[in-house]
Image: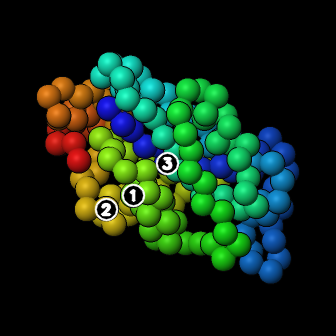
Amino acid sequence: MNVIVCVKQIPDPALPGELDPSTNTLKRDGKLILDESDSYGVEMALQLVTAAGGGEVSLVSMAPNDETSGLRTALAMGAAKAVLVSDATLSGADALTTAKVLAAATKKLGDVDLIIAGTESSDGYTGTVPEQIAEVLGLPSITFAKTVSIADGVLKVDRQTEAGYDEVTCSLP
């Protein structure tokens, strides 16, 4: 089983943030860390690959200044490889542009059985990038997954809702 995890590297929330007055966006000049919510996605992917009896966990990320600190954390957790897209022209990119870039990066990795993304980043909180990636790639999307299992090419998810949990299934790509 081959799983891709979309991860975001964010400014360390333990350090004081600073806005760039020319763009009104958060400065990302210093060391970035792996968004905590994405570490859960990496762990879920590793568990699914282990349960499947083999495969690979790959990471895709977009960050400024060729920053790899957060990716190194995810690689240390056990991911096999990472693709970083870093281009000054993407600075301050909106959610749809980010989704298109990450979708293109996933295509470069070849065959994939599952793409995992967090609900939302803890520095932007748009919460739309995962669904936009799915739409760009023409794949189904299941949000707010709490437990995930795979059997016979079918993904089974317990999905958290305001009313409790829904059990949802879909075929893998």
First-in-chain label (3 vs 1)? 3
Toward the viewer: 60 or 145?
60
Q: Which residue is mark 1?
A: 107
The residue singled out by tag 2 in the image is 137
Between tags 3 and 1, which lies in front? 1
Q: Is disc 2 surrounded by few (<14), some (14 to 19) or many (20+) residues within 10 Å?
A: some
- 169 over 130 or under it: above or below: above
The residue to which callout 3 is attached is 6
The residue type indicated by label 1 comes to: Lys
Pointers 1 and 2 in contact (C-beta within 8 Å): yes
Q: Looking at the image, which residue is at 82% across and 59% down?
A: 29
Looking at the rendered structure, the number of numbered marks drawn on it comes to 3
- Picture disc at residue 162: none
Residue type, numbered disc 2: Leu
Tag 3: amino acid: Cys
Q: Is residue 71 visible?
A: yes
Q: Position of residue 38 (x, y in %)?
A: 54, 40
Please say whether residue 99 is visible from this viewpoint: no
Q: Quadrant of residue 153?
A: top left
Distance Cα–Cα, label 3 vs label 1 = 13 Å
**Image quarter for residue 77?**
top right
